Amino acid sequence: MRGKTMPMLIELAAGPWAACILPAFGMNTVSLSFYGKPILRAPPSLRKLEEDSCAYGIPVLLPPNRTDQGRFTFDGICYQLPQNDQTLKCNLHGVLHQRPFTIMERTKYAVLAVYESAGEDYPFSFSLEVLCKLDRAGYRQQFVIKNTGNQDMPLTFGLHTTFLEQGLLRVDLGKRWVLNERMLPTGEVEPLRQEEAAYLRGGRFRGQKIHGFYTASGHTAQIGNILYTVSENFDHWVLWNGDGKQGFCTIEPLQGGINALNSGEGLIRLKPGQRAVFETNFQYAEARKSGLPCLLYIPDGVGGGMSRTPTGGKQYRRCPPPDRYWTYP
């Protein structure tokens, strides 16, 4: 291992579902499976994850996507974020997906962790609590962002959810934002193009390049037999699959638009002590039809304890978690 220490990997399992989470990398759910079939693109090695921490699992993004020049003005004060995208001269996705979280509570089915920033990663004091929980109905996450400072805080938030290509793709898209040559919105919105309207209806797009930024007409996406539902405060979607030949597709829910810190599109103003709560849910499509209950319990204040949900007594097979195969190059 060349002197490296393997970061702690949290394994959760309930019924046919299994998840693996890396607290050291922004509480990234690097693996999620249903009856042993992988759903997310998992990193083949720790080095690959270190090289591109947004390319696997479910990285948290604050601020999400691009901020022009990494610069923005809020309440008359100019702030500068690192320009970590030198090609397009932007801040891209922030750095929270690279930061270690502290575990607060853990059970067989759930884990709660927190990250606290005094302004070193984003120029405002805040905390982010992440609750991940499995039950027989699926996998749920809750993200609670609290302004812990003494001044108002601008907030835009997203998830770089990276699925393995599963054939069927359908997303609740609204209209498309027109982007310039630096992948920043021009301020114009247009109706979906013919190929984009197909994403709304649902279809198979294997091998086709997909890249676009959209308003949300709803809050559900489907890839293969997996339904991905997000809370209503996510008001945009980004779709991206590289060159279309790498076997993955990101379905990214965003609160606020690309470059929202400058445009103000969907930007939230958090007062001192105020919280914003975001939620996501992964569910097997047939489970929704069968009416399986959603058994997630989130107590007031998030940190007051986590319920232990029985799996119904039915025995399920599950594959070994991906860390058994991880190697250090």
Image (spheres, helix red, strand yellow):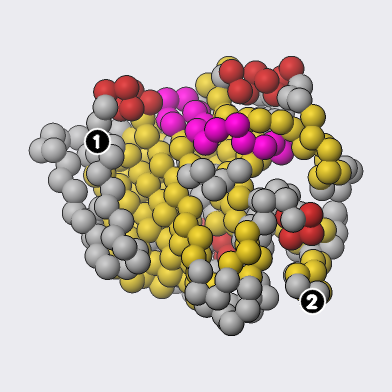
Q: Which quadrant of the figure contains the C terminus? A: bottom right
Image location of residue 213, percent across then percent down: 71, 38
Which class describes the residues within 10 Å of circle 2: few (<14), some (14-19), or many (20+)? few
- Distance (Cα) linking label 2 and label 1: 48 Å
Note whether residue 166 is visible. Answer: yes
At x 82% / y 58%, what residue is drawn? 68
Total marks shown come to: 2
Q: Residue furthest left?
A: 313
SS for callout 2? strand
Q: Is residue 71 left or right of residue 245?
A: right
Q: Which residues are magenta?
A: 211-227
Foreground residue, 143 or 159?
143
Magenta portion: prevailing SS class: strand
Q: Is residue 210 left or right of residue 17?
A: right
Quick check: is 236 in the magenta stretch? no
Q: Kindly report which numbered mark, 2 or 1, lies closer to the viewer in this rendering.
A: 2
Specify the quadrant of the image occupied by residue 305: bottom left
Q: Residue furthest right?
A: 181
- Considering only vertical position in the picture, is 219 above or below 304? above
Note whether residue 243 is visible. Answer: no
* Residue at numbered disc 2: 77
The numbered dot on residue 293 is: 1
